[in-house]
Amino acid sequence: MKTYQNLKTELKEGILHVTISRPQALNALNMETMSELGAVLQEADHESVRAIILSGEGEKAFVAGADIKEIATLSKEEAAAFARRGQILFKQWEDFTKPIIAAVNGFALGGGCELAMCCHIRIATENAKFGQPEVNLGIIPGYGGTQRLTQLVGRGKALELMMTGDLISAQEAKNIGLVNHVVATHAELAELAQKIVSKILAKAPVAIAQLIKSVNAGFDFEKAGYEAEAIHFGECTTTQDFKEGTTAFIEKRQPQFKGK
Ligand code: CAA
């Protein structure tokens, strides 16, 4: 396997363990990490890899979102392009025809929740927290969250989560169908991920691939929702509220939104 700046990889008995590793920024997805997530998926498209388990480094976060410091200065056009690039990458993960499990230990917020949602199965430790808190920054989810959260939990709950920016516990995420299983510890999370993958790998690989393709075909990426999300994500970045939201995050204070 290649060496990555922000990913740790280990191939063990056909399972590629990918760990996002930027603990100083709670594993936030900067552009370099996004491009490495594309490269590692390409590497995984090889017969030696039969499944992927994706996790975040450390005890605190799976991924705390897109890197806010990087998006703070994007123009409308740059922001829409940024969202489209992320959407395409996450679609590649979703369409990968070998099983991918997100093992979520800690925060899965914004782009982090969106990354977990493009994996085929999500499991979490009980300290994990999920949410789409982009509204606190004056923006909306941009990596497919408006679509996949709605698919997974239904329109009403998805809108509530995205409009309030509330963070929910792993147990609540399980109750609404965002997460499949919750365990107590990090060690149990790794064990469960391994157990689920082993069960799937005992089945016929072609049937598994056809299952993934069939399920995904019902959630057509070409539908207008993803493109609308990218455009509206871009539009949000033209507001004073976006400047205020991102500046407030960086200055570690509450934002004062004005509706312009
Ligand atoms: N981007 C960049 N840096 C981040 C980050 C992010 N998404 N999340 C956390 N960090 C950084 C913090 O700036 C901080 O860095 P410094 O030590 O240099 O100040 C470090 O990680 C630790 O974070 P906190 O001090 O904030 O830790 P905390 O325990 O007090 O709070 C938290 C944890 C609640 C997760 C908080 O960090 C937080 O709210 N993070 C942002 C979550 C968020 O809004 N995510 C959405 C991003 S936008 C997006 O993802 C758009 C999209 O859809 C594509």
Image (spheres, rainbow, N blue to C red):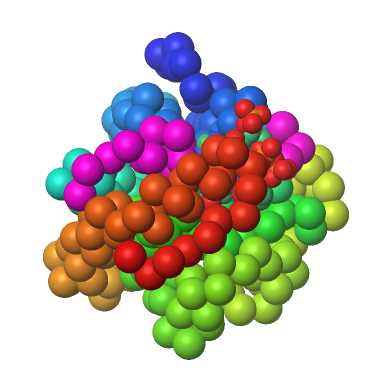
**Residue appearing at x 54%, y 47% in the figure:** 248
Residue 58, compared with residue 200, is above or below; it is above
Classify the position of ligand 1 by quadrant: top left, top right, bottom left or bottom right.
Answer: top right
Q: Position of residue 260 (x, y in %)?
A: 33, 65
Q: Is residue 108 above or below residue 213?
A: above
Measuring from the top left, give residue 133's x and y in whole percent: 53, 60
Q: Is residue 252 left or right of residue 119?
A: right
From the top left corner, tell me how far across and down residue 114 is, in percent. Answer: 45, 55
For residue 44, side relative to residue 65 (left or right):
left
What x and y, as percent, mark residue 11?
53, 24
Q: Which residues are magenta?
A: 58-76
Residue shown at 56%/45% (left/top)?
A: 249
Q: Residue furthest top?
A: 3
Residue placed furthest toward the bottom: 156
Q: Nearer the viewer, residue 142 or 7?
A: 142
Compared with 42, 87 (above or below) is below
Which residue shows up at 46% across the image and 79% down it? 159
Q: Where is 196 relative to 157, above or below?
A: above
Relative side of 146 to 186, left or right: left
Q: Which quadrant would residue 27 be assigned to in this image? A: top right
User: Is residue 231 something one can see in this rendering?
Assistant: yes
**Residue 71 is covered by the magenta coloring:** yes
Residue 181 placement: quadrant = bottom right
